[in-house]
Image (cartoon, rainbow, N blue to C red):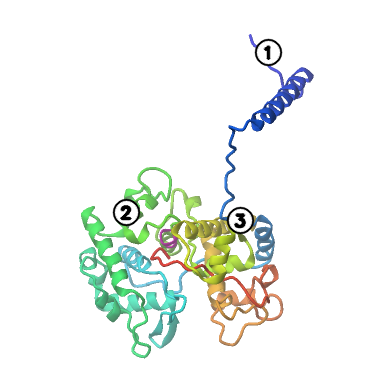
Amino acid sequence: MGVHYSGAHPIMQACQLAFYAFRAELMTEVLKSPNVRVAVAPAPLVTVDEAACRKLATLISTYEVPIDREDNALPSASRLDIGNFYFWLVAICHQTSPKGGVRLAGTVNGRNLQGWDYLSARFEAAIAVQPRLLTPETWTHMTGDDLRQLFRDQTLGDRLTDPDGRAGLIRDLGSVMIGNGWKHFEDLYRLAGRRILEGDPNLLQLLSRFRAYNDPVHKKAYFLLALMRNGGLWTYADDWNLGAPVDYHEIRGHLRIGTVTINDRTLKEKVQNETPVTAEEDVAIRTAVHDAIMLVSELTEIRNPSRLHYLFWNVFRSCCTRNSPHCRRCPVTCTLPPRYVPLALASGVRRCPFAAACKSAGNATMLTEHVFTTDWY
């Protein structure tokens, strides 16, 4: 029968101290050897600033954060059609407000819309006339000219960037769907057993088979899965694995607030000088932003990264713009959705809801999102 010593036993403590002293002496002698080379792990390129996240979470905790939802609910469409609608639409939802370019915009049913809102409304109007746009067979024949025509505004003209590249993503959607015998996005949901990340297969695994959804940070995948949940269509067996979809608006906002810190001097200079970054650097930045959102979600006890994503995305694209952020006061042209306006008015003056927790608020110069050509986001 063996004898067990707890950590508090005096004999055990003496043994431990003797061992630690011996190990320290041994390491000192080893390091003196000219043949020894000590490898020091490089610091991460980008890290989460926990103190800044806590400050932001404390501020957000004073707000009534609206639930995450889409303004276009497709009330007349079936569950299967809504799934294919979002599956198709999110696949080409990237770079709708490109740096140095014009923002995707136009008028639909008398409403002046931009970015995702315009993309969604135009496609919704198109499928009402051409329901076949929701079938994988049609997707396999999609061309850049088809997309140009689909999203051309009568007044502003063609503003959709890289229609040929986006059409390639749609053709790939159709080919993979048909190759696997799938007709609806719903088929993937059933095959995955409602699992996002647990088990085999799961939704992230299945989505990664498509070129449009093979982003290692899962921006489009998380956004798509959140849309299906928020529309009341899907529930997940492992809902806690639904991460935050990170796009360039959120990158810009979190870099400015300071919830993420760029440690690598070369990378920081690239961001400051708007020099293109590598794929590894892009993933490092977006992963840190994702982790910051997840941490804030926990610290606020909201524990819903998607809900915070909608908050951040709407505020950053409306108030924390690239060139004219609304740190101190929002202009009359501010496009913040009405459900978030009470947050902007919380200080008594309508301004960015995050100004009180932002390290960059009011600064003459601010970081913006990094430059990286991709169709991931």
Task: Check disc 3: other Cα within 10 Å, few if <14, some if 14-19, many if 20+.
Answer: many
Q: Earlier in the sequence, mark 1 or mark 3?
A: 1
Secondary structure beneath label 1: loop
Which corner quadrant of the image does residue 233 belong to? bottom left
Q: Tell me: residue 156, above or below residue 50.
A: below
Task: Check disc 2: other Cα within 10 Å, few if <14, some if 14-19, many if 20+.
Answer: some
Report the magenta residues as a range. 219-223
Q: Amino acid at mark 1?
A: Val
Q: CA distance from mark 3 to mark 2?
A: 30 Å
Residue found at x 57% / y 73%: 315
Residue designated by label 3: 48
Residue found at x 39% / y 50%: 194
Helix, strand or loop for the magenta stretch, by majority:
helix
Q: Amino acid at mark 2?
A: Arg
The percent coordinates of residue 1 (x first, y second) are 63, 8
Q: Tell me: residue 269, above or below residue 96.
A: above
Residue designated by label 2: 209
Q: CA distance from mark 1 to mark 2?
A: 56 Å
| Residue farthest to the top, as pictured | 1
Observer-side mark, 3 or 2, equals 3
| Residue farthest to the front, as pictured | 34
Instruction: Give the numbered dot on residue 103.
Output: none
The answer to whether any part of residue 67 appears in the image is no
The percent coordinates of residue 203 (x first, y second) are 38, 52
Instruction: Give the numbered dot on residue 3.
Output: 1
Q: Amino acid at mark 3?
A: Val
Callout 3 touching callout 2 (CB < 8 Å): no
| Residue farthest to the right, as pictured | 10
Secondary structure beneath label 3: strand
